Image (cartoon, helix red, strand yellow):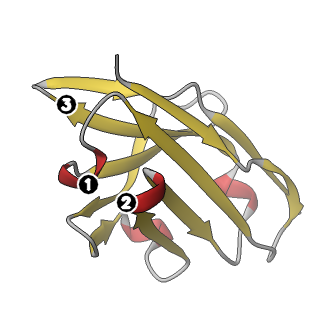
Amino acid sequence: QVQLVESGGGLVQAGESLRLSCEGSGFIFSRNGMSWFRQGPGKQREWVGTIIGDSQTNYRDSVEGRFAISRDNAKNTVYLQMNDLKPEDTAVYYCNAAVGGRSYWGQGTQVTVSS
């Protein structure tokens, strides 16, 4: 079955960086677009960015230029590099894959940015 497992979250100070990882299994990883979402405290889940193919990416405006998504198909892993983190980036971050017309989510990883 499809599984997505995120890792790499933590507590950082504003201006610092983190890299999140999401390892997928149970599907042909290299053929799938992969996305990152986040859900801040008291907020709805929101889209962060997507990678299609090996390197085509797009991002929500608030993270453009600070966040970067990449992937290593040999490791079935997608990454979210987050730089210049801000307190408003505090959220649980989820990776997402649409496989066979169904949307799959990981369990999420907490990112907390202190000011």
Q: Which x, y percent locates residue 21?
A: 59, 52
Amino acid type at circle 3 is Val
Judged by depth in the image, the label closer to the viewer, 1 or 3, is 1
Q: Which residue is mark 2?
A: 73
Which numbered dot is residue 30?
1
Q: Secondary structure at mark 3?
A: strand
In the image, is 66 to the left or to the right of 88? left
**What residue occupies the far front of the structure in this picture?**
74
Q: Quadrant of residue 56?
A: bottom left
In the rendered image of this protein, does residue 13 appear above or below residue 95?
below
Amino acid type at circle 1 is Ser
* Mark nearer the N terminus (3 vs 2): 2
Residue shown at the point (37%, 60%) measured from the top left: 73
Q: Which x, y percent locates residue 79?
A: 52, 60
Q: CA distance from mark 3 to mark 2?
A: 16 Å
Residue shown at the point (54%, 62%) measured from the top left: 80
Query: Few, some or many C-alpha atoms within 10 Å of disc 1 (few <14, some 14-19, many ≥20)?
Result: some
Q: Which x, y percent locates residue 7?
A: 68, 43
Q: Quadrant of the C terminus?
A: bottom right
Residue shown at the point (70%, 78%) measured from the top left: 84
**What residue occupies the far left of the structure in this picture?**
101
- Kindly check if marks 2 and 1 are in contact, taking CB atoms under 8 A apart as contact: yes
Judged by depth in the image, the label closer to the viewer, 3 or 2, is 2
Residue shown at the point (43%, 50%) measured from the top left: 76
Q: Which x, y percent locates residue 31?
A: 18, 51
Q: Which residue is mark 3?
A: 99
Q: CA distance from mark 1 to mark 3?
A: 12 Å
Q: Quadrant of the N terminus?
A: top left
Q: Secondary structure at mark 1?
A: helix
* Mark nearer the N terminus (1 vs 3): 1
Q: Secondary structure at mark 2?
A: helix
